[in-house]
Image (tube, rainbow, N blue to C red):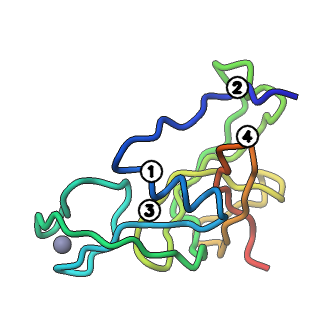
Amino acid sequence: MAYEKPLPRVTADTKPFWEGSKEHQLRFQKCRSCGHVRWPASVICPKCYSDQPDWIVSSGKGKVYSFVVHHRTFDKAFEQELPYVAALVELEEGPIFLSSIVDLRPEEVKINMPVEVTWKDITQEFSIPKFKPLS
Ligand SMILES: [Zn+2]
């Protein structure tokens, strides 16, 4: 069955992230100058303006920083997942990442709940990071 949701738009800045996702690695830029780990990927560090990042592989572990439960959608491609949880996940390395929480009922999601990344292979080219309760 064809994937009907919007696909990521890969840019020069995000290409290493999506290449990592395909290998089920959650990658973030880490500033070579000040060590700040950032998301989203960008040309310069928002803390020190250095343009020299390295890419690191995240542990994929973090906690729920905030979330909402969607009971309606404006895109038919998401209807079969209703209700679903969109969450901000604070990773151990620092970035706060927008994703969704899977593998539990929406009413079971709590702020500060420990979670870990899990991967959904959506097409030949893309795997999408989601989060599930830490096992
Ligand atoms: Zn920096």
Report, in whole angstroms, how far the alpha carbon at label 2 lies from the one at label 4: 25 Å
Ligand 1 in which quarter: bottom left
Name the foreground residue: 87 vs 117. Answer: 117
Q: Amino acid at mark 4?
A: Thr
Q: Amino acid at mark 3?
A: Ile
First of labels 2, 3 by sequence position:
2
Name the foreground residue: 29 vs 95. Answer: 29
Which residue lies at the image location 74% right of the left edge and 64% below the top edge?
132
Residue where numbered disc 3 is placed: 96
Q: Name the mark on residue 72.
A: 2
Question: Residue 11 in the image: x percent, y percent?
Answer: 39, 41
* Structural crowding at the residue carrying mark 2, measured as other residues with C-alpha within 10 Å and reported as few (<14), some (14–19) or many (≥20): few
In the picture, which quadrant includes the N terminus?
Answer: top right
Residue where numbered disc 4 is placed: 123
Mark 3: secondary structure: strand
Q: How many marks?
A: 4
First of labels 1, 3 by sequence position:
1
18 lies above or below 24: above
Q: Name the mark on residue 133.
A: none
Mark 1: secondary structure: helix
Residue where numbered disc 1 is placed: 15
Depth check, mark 2 against mark 3: the one in front is 3
Relative horizontal placement of residue 77, taking residue 16 as reference (left or right): right
